[in-house]
């Protein structure tokens, strides 16, 4: 059993190590809707990959990166709010992705697996590709982490300390796009943003510094992964929803504990 689950466990750990810092950034910058948009666009990336017989990661990464970079100039669009634009892009890309999958005669992918993920079907080649993408993601985070933290706390302070913040904005967009590329096979389109937000929101209850929040978010992500996979194997529930449901339960318990300790 362990040898069967080992690729999935390693891939899940890689995902959690990536989700913790990116989730903190998403919570600090209130970027959950951008994460949702990139997650929805991943389905279009999968459809394009199947159409041109590419590896899934190539199409997903290209589409996610294109949409993320497109949002930077669109933020200056005055006639519609940022949330409205993100909503249009998110649901349009999801619709076009589903249409492309349906019309492709060579489609051999189960749409439900794309929407909810299937971490238990991962193979060692999948893990190697995910590991390479994760290393690239971690390298960008390590290079820009201090700048990103300062930028999230105060854009004005970041401009004073580092000058232009354009590099930081691009770095954040790039790691988000890479995370979507890594996560789609594991938890699916619908649950990517939840895996980012819920453990980081849980960490907010117990953290006083950015680094504390990062560590607690990582612990929460890993616990959610292990509990979700255990339930999936033993209770026969979908793995992706099981992981996110476990994260949600940890969030609720943390809220209760935080409320009790703050009163005392």
Image: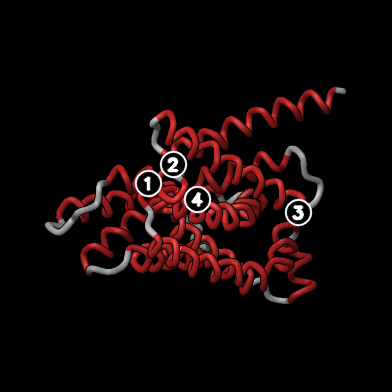
Quick check: marks 1 and 2 in contact, CB under 8 Å? yes
Query: x and y percent of residue 16 in the render?
Result: 57, 52
* Disc 4/disc 1 C-alpha distance (Å): 12 Å
Closer to viewer: mark 4 or mark 1? 4
* Disc 4/disc 3 C-alpha distance (Å): 27 Å
Q: Quadrant of residue 173?
A: bottom right
* SS state under label 2: helix
Q: Mark 2 points at which residue?
A: 240
Q: Quadrant of residue 136?
A: bottom right
**First along the sequence among labels 4 and 1:** 4
Query: x and y percent of residue 72 in the render?
Result: 52, 65
Quick check: marks 4 and 2 in contact, CB under 8 Å? no
Q: Name the residue under label 4.
A: 9
Query: x and y percent of residue 226 in the render?
Result: 55, 41
How many residues crowd around disc 1 within 10 Å: few (fewer than 14), some, or many (20 or more)? many
Q: In this view, does 12 lie to the left or right of 155?
A: left
Foreground residue among 163 and 103: 103
Q: Residue at x 75, y 57 (%)?
A: 153
- 87 lies above or below 59: above
Q: Is residue 49 left or right of residue 85?
A: left
* Disc 1/disc 2 C-alpha distance (Å): 7 Å
- 79 lies above or below 206: below
* Disc 1/disc 3 C-alpha distance (Å): 32 Å
* Disc 4/disc 2 C-alpha distance (Å): 13 Å
Q: Residue at x 80, y 51 (%)?
A: 209
Q: Residue 210 carries which label?
A: 3
The reply to whether residue 137 is in sight is yes
């Amino acid at each position: 059993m362990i040898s069967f689950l080992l690729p999935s466990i390693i891939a899940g750990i890689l995902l959690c190590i990536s989700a913790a810092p990116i989730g903190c950034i998403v919570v600090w910058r209130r970027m959950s809707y951008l994460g949702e948009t990139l997650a929805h666009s991943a389905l279009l990336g999968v459809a394009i990959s199947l159409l041109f017989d590419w590896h899934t990661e190539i199409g997903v990464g290209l589409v996610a990166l294109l949409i993320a970079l497109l949002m930077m100039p669109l933020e200056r669009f005055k006639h519609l709010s940022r949330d409205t634009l993100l909503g249009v892009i998110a649901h349009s890309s999801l619709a076009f992705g589903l249409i492309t999958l349906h019309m492709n005669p060579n489609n051999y992918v189960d749409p439900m697996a794309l929407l909810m993920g299937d971490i238990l079907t991962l193979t060692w080649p999948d893990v190697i590709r995910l590991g390479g993408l994760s290393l690239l993601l971690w390298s960008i985070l390590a290079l820009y982490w201090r700048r990103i933290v300062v930028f999230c706390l105060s854009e004005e302070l970041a401009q004073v300390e580092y000058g232009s913040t354009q590099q930081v904005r691009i770095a954040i967009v790039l790691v988000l796009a890479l995370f979507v590329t890594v996560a789609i096979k594991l938890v699916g389109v619908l649950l990517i943003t939840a895996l980012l937000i819920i453990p980081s929101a849980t960490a907010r209850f117990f953290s006083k510094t950015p680094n504390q929040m990062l560590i607690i978010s990582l612990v929460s992500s890993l616990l959610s992964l292990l509990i979700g996979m255990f339930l999936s194997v033993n209770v026969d529930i979908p793995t992706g929803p099981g992981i996110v449901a476990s994260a949600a339960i940890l969030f609720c318990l943390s809220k209760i504990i935080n409320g009790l300790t703050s009163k005392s």
